[in-house]
Image (tube, coloured by chain):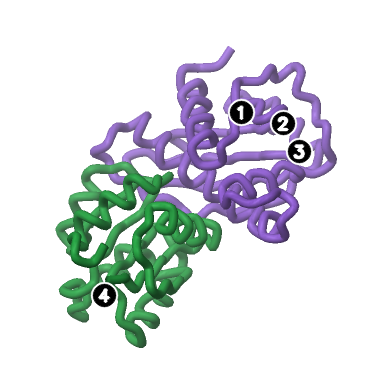
């Protein structure tokens, strides 16, 4: 059962994925989200303002070139899609974060957003992340992605 | 008449998307320069004439606000139109940027329609 805040974050992420990467997402069942891959990419950013917090997006490594290709409007096999994989993922997170903050706090407060960073996670780390209560599982074009949102604190 | 454009964003992907969106919007671009942060942008502006600048806010080395303040100090905003393209939706931030001389603010993700409308509005019909 998603909390109201988790539902909002998931909804905003799905809207951003649809507009930016032409990919469609929907909530996924955490219990049925066993890690199918050995490597995952996580991009993470923080924000400060009237409230501080953190937003992280974790996706299967194999999904990254597809996201980049869709953002750039090129073929997934194009070398540029592979080269832009991390960059495109960070941009998806960046846009999601901005829209989540507006949805939560309105248009008056000013937040300073950090530049997103990336790291690699293995299947064990992915499972640990999945089990956290502040993590939402979503299915994007049949791939399970995880969104972790810590509003009011920095994880 | 065609425009000389400078696209400033730390993401090469975003720079490519903005360039492509300008093309799809049929904005007449004669020359296009790119910079990964405000400092690189100021270096390009010192060497080249630019009509229209698209810039992100959150960038390493020198962010968009600092760059715009430097452009104002150097008198560059009198001849260069600046469009901020950012994920931030704070009306307070937008008003702050406009008070510093920014011509328009676009929220990511941008579409060809919104870019076309903004460019026509701030550059006038004679250039587009």
Specify which label sits upstream in the sequence, 1 or 2. Answer: 1
Instruction: Determine the chain carrying the residue at label 4.
Output: B
Measured along the vertical axis of the image, is residue A11 above or below residue A47? above
Query: For mark 3, what is the residue?
Result: A125
Disc 1: host chain: A
Q: Residue A121: give x, y in percent of width and height.
A: 75, 44
Mark pair 1, 4: CA separation: 41 Å
Residue found 33% across the figure and 80% down from its top: B45
Q: Nearer the viewer, mark 4 or mark 2?
A: 2
In three-dimensional space, the C-alpha distance between marks 3 and 2, rounded to whole angstroms, equals 17 Å
Q: Colour of chain B?
A: green
Question: Which residue sits at x=63%, y=44%?
Answer: A67
Asked whether the beta carbons under mark 3 and mark 4 sit within 8 Å of each other, the answer is no
Same chain for mark 3 and mark 4? The answer is no
| Viewer-closest of A48 and B64 | B64
> Residue B51 lies in what quarter of the image?
bottom left
Q: Which residue is mark 4?
A: B70
User: In the rendered image, which quarter is residue A37 located in?
Assistant: top right
Depth check, mark 1 against mark 4: the one in front is 4
Determine crowd level at label 4: few under 14, some 14-19, many 20+ residues with C-alpha closer than 10 A: some
Instruction: Report whether A107 appears left or right of A14.
Output: left
- Viewer can see residue B46: yes
Disc 4 versus disc 2: distance between alpha carbons? 45 Å
């Amino acid at each position: 059962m998603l909390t109201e805040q988790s539902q909002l974050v998931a909804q905003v992420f799905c809207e951003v994925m649809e507009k930016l990467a032409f990919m469609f997402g929907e909530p996924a069942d955490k219990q049925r989200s066993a890690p199918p891959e050995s490597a995952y990419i996580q991009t993470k950013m923080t924000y400060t303002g009237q409230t501080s917090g953190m937003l992280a997006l974790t996706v299967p490594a194999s999904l990254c070139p597809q996201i980049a290709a869709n953002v750039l409007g090129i073929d997934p096999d194009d070398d540029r899609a592979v080269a832009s994989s991390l960059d495109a993922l960070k941009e998806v997170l960046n846009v999601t974060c901005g829209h989540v903050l507006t949805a939560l706090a309105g248009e008056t407060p000013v937040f300073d957003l950090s530049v997103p960073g990336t790291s690699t996670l293995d299947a064990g780390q992915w499972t640990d992340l999945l089990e956290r209560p502040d993590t939402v599982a979503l299915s994007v074009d049949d791939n399970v992605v995880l969104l972790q949102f810590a509003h009011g604190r920095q994880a | 008449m065609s425009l000389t454009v400078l696209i400033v964003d730390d993401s090469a992907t975003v720079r490519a998307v903005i360039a492509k969106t300008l093309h799809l919007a049929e904005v007449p671009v004669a020359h296009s320069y790119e910079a990964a942060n405000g400092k690189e942008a100021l270096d390009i502006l010192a060497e080249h004439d630019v009509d229209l600048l698209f810039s992100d806010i959150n960038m390493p080395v020198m962010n968009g606000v600092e760059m715009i303040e430097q452009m104002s100090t150097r008198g560059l905003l009198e001849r260069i139109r600046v469009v901020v393209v950012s994920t931030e939706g704070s009306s307070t931030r937008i008003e702050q940027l406009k008070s510093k001389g920014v011509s328009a603010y676009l929220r990511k993700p941008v579409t060809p329609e919104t870019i076309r409308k903004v460019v026509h509005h701030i550059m006038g019909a004679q250039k587009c």
